[in-house]
Image: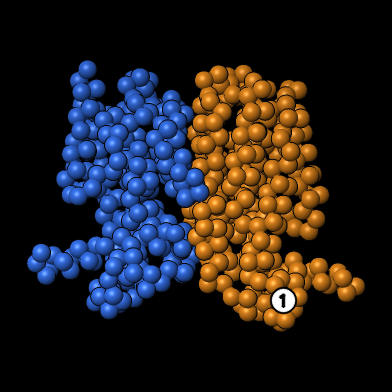
Chain colours: A orange, B blue
Amino acid sequence: MAKQDRAVRTRQELIRCAAETFYRRGFALSSLSEISGKAGVSTGALNFHFQSKRELGEAVEVAASETLRRITGPRPSHCPVPLQALVDTTHELARYLSEDPILRAGFSLGHDAAWSAGDGGPLWPQWESWVLGALAVAGEAGNLAADVALDDAGAAVTAAVVGFEVLGRIDARWFSHRTVTHFWELMLPRLASTEIGGELDAGGAGAPAGPAPRGDAVAVCRAQGERRCQVAKDRGAA
Amino acid sequence: MAKQDRAVRTRQELIRCAAETFYRRGFALSSLSEISGKAGVSTGALNFHFQSKRELGEAVEVAASETLRRITGPRPSHCPVPLQALVDTTHELARYLSEDPILRAGFSLGHDAAWSAGDGGPLWPQWESWVLGALAVAGEAGNLAADVALDDAGAAVTAAVVGFEVLGRIDARWFSHRTVTHFWELMLPRLASTEIGGELDAGGAGAPAGPAPRGDAVAVCRAQGERRCQVAKDRGAA
């Protein structure tokens, strides 16, 4: 392996180990020596990549934000049933939260008082903003019931997913496909217009049942997004 | 003031100051000297009441749990419209979260990794259990739509309120009467049976608009509970 590849891998491994440690112990009690030990490198090697614990925290947040961007993708304006894309994306976020330590740590740093005193970090605003955008597209496409206010629906979906994330730390059932499906079974009859209500799948359309993809997450996630859209297109054409 | 009264007051003040410090800094970075300084007592006086930071944390959790018990009261089986009692109680919880540092800290300790590694503390299970009980009573009273599953509704209400609590740390609008009202405006048409749908007030029935009660919280909360029930009874009789 070239020296540069090795350095990139070490950096990624340090971010992953830092994320696991921050999530389990909280930012304040996480030590650089524990993180370097988990990653199997010396503290000197850690210091070559990150000059402080804060820099490691920032790297975790940036990586988590990037993963969230891949999960959400652009606004689902190219899908014939954008509301289904919102449902599917929520399922995918819950699945990633249950399996991806960096994404999980990125969200939990947002409510770790020792890390983000007061501002909450970038992940929750990023999620809320995407949800509001997706609902706006769904509304324009005629997917939403006429008496549903976008902001109210956005707040309910945002708050419930925050709840799943926080409660999932205590009990993994809150991350489960079942919990998210039941949430949408409850919400969709209220949110969806009568025209598309029967078309929607609270369990997520086209989401693979297996574990979260490894390796080239960008490519895998893009493929998932296309599959989701294809399912939605087939439904739209049917 | 008798010596014993002074001791009780000092203890209560220490719990309040500890709660504020835990909430702002997180448990790990909170120091006993800061807490005793805020309370205006010596560290020796603090040690007379609490032998460790952990004991202070436990006292905050016990006090928060007691406040939550006063807010929720018993199951609203004596109210003619138990679903309204659930709505009202959610409003009252949000109001307390915005104003009561001990309740807020009790909930936030539950997702503070340095405090409750893995178990989440007693507050969230206590709230979830009460919500499920209240929904069961509402179901027995014919308040719920026939196709609503209790567990799904309970999970959605629990998760959304967790979300309001966590997001409220970043932005107080999540604790607001408006946010909770909009959540219920969205949920009630889905949850409520057609028989009582028109009777329900998403903004909360009979909840006072002023700040959270001070002083004898038990008596004030009991009076609020009776007022809520009276409003519900009037509606039931109308």
Q: In the picture shown, does residue A145 fall above or below B93?
A: above
Residue B147 seen by the camera:
no
Q: Nearer the viewer, residue B119 or B12?
A: B12
Q: Quadrant of the C terminus of chain A?
A: top right
The chain carrying label 1 is A
Q: Residues within 10 Å of mark 1 (few under 14, many from 20)?
A: few
Say which residue label 1 marks: A47
Q: Is A237 displayed left or right of A149 in the figure?
A: right
Give coordinates of residue B237: x percent, y percent.
20, 20
| Residue at image location 59% in from the left, 75% down from the top | A31
| Quarter placement of the N terminus of chain A | bottom right
- Residue A6 percent across, percent down from the top left: 83, 72
Is A103 situated left or right of B55 in this image? right
- Image: B52 above or below A195: below
Depicted B22 relative to depicted A147: above or below = below
Query: Residue reaching furthest right?
Result: A2
In which quadrant of the rendered view does residue A234 lie? top right
> Front-most of B39 and B133?
B39
Per the image, label 1 sits on a secondary structure element best described as: helix
Instruction: Specify the amino acid type for callout 1.
Output: Asn
Nearer the observer, B235 or A200: B235
Q: Which quadrant would residue A4 be assigned to in this image?
A: bottom right
